[in-house]
Image (cartoon, rainbow, N blue to C red):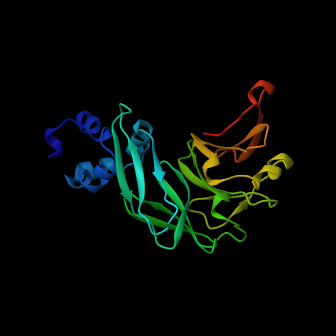
């Protein structure tokens, strides 16, 4: 079937479709389309062209969890129920992938709700709570990294696919605000994670490529009524 349609037209069609349609239906059209959507180049390009979304969580763990998918025009919104592993809480998300933490804070995994695939991560020796576990994407190498920032402990990072957590260097100022971080006060953007505290006068950024932290101080006029949205 693919031989009757020019490849550039096939790509144009596939890039316009959401991931669940691509991997739930379109990859089975023919072998050629399967190979296209499974290639790292297609995955990377589709990610760049995709619109944003958000996971909607409810207080009761037994209630359904949903993904809010935004359309190209901003007013095209779809609510999709997402399936996650049992006995685990959502800790962080990035590019549609989700870090799940078991209630005991020892067992961690990354899950893809669209493809219904799961990867178990090595246990973290000192994870205190799920809110200190964040997922970041290294754009340059195309790998994901999980960052754990426990209060008063050196931050650690795990490159997804590795078996060992590695210590990271951080500043004293960063350590002072870690205990005030909450799950909804981190932002993943490109290769960076950003944190801000209610009482802090700066933002802390983490560069997933260089694995370094930086303090970004606000101008005095911007400190009044600062909130993280």
Of 197 and 153, the residue lying toward us: 197
Give the residue furthest to the right: 172
**Relative vertical location of residue 52 with respect to residue 23 in this rendering, above or below:** above
Q: Where is residue 48 in the image (x, y as percent from the top left)?
A: 44, 38
Quadrant of the image occupied by residue 117: bottom left
**Relative vertical location of residue 138 with respect to residue 219 in this rendering, above or below:** below
Of 229 and 38, the residue lying toward us: 229
What residue appears at the point 31 percent right and 47 percent down from the top-left corner? 36
The quarter of the image holding the C terminus is top right
Quadrant of the image occupied by residue 75: top left
Of 142 and 108, the residue lying toward us: 108
Q: Where is residue 49 in the image (x, y as percent from the top left)?
A: 40, 36
Q: Where is residue 60 in the image (x, y as percent from the top left)?
A: 50, 66
Quadrant of the image occupied by residue 191: top right
Left or right: where 150 falls relative to 136: right
What residue appears at the point 78 percent right and 41 percent down from the top-left corner? 200
Q: How many labels does the image show?
A: 0
What residue appears at the point 74 percent right and 27 percent down from the top-left corner? 222
Q: Position of residue 89 (x, y in %)?
A: 54, 65
């Amino acid at each position: 079937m693919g031989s009757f349609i020019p490849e550039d037209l096939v790509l144009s069609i596939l890039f316009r479709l959401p991931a669940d349609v691509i991997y739930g239906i379109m990859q089975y059209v023919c072998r050629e389309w399967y190979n296209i959507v499974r290639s790292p180049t297609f995955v990377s390009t589709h990610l760049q062209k995709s619109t944003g979304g958000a996971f909607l969580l409810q207080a009761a763990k037994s209630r359904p969890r949903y993904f809010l998918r935004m359309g190209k025009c901003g007013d095209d919104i779809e609510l999709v129920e997402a399936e996650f592993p049992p006995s685990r809480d959502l800790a962080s998300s990035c590019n549609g992938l989700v870090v799940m933490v078991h209630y005991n804070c020892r067992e961690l995994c990354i899950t893809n709700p669209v493809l219904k695939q799961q990867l178990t991560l090595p246990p973290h020796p000192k994870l205190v709570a799920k809110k200190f576990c964040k997922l970041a994407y290294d754009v340059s190498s195309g790998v994901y990294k999980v960052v754990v920032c426990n209060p008063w402990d050196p931050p650690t990072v795990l490159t997804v696919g590795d078996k060992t957590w590695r210590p990271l260097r951080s500043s004293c100022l960063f350590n002072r605000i870690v205990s005030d971080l909450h799950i909804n006060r981190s932002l993943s953007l490109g290769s960076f994670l950003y944190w801000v505290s209610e009482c802090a006068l700066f933002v802390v950024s983490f560069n997933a490529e260089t694995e370094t932290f930086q303090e970004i101080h606000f101008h005095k006029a911007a400190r009044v009524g600062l909130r993280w949205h």
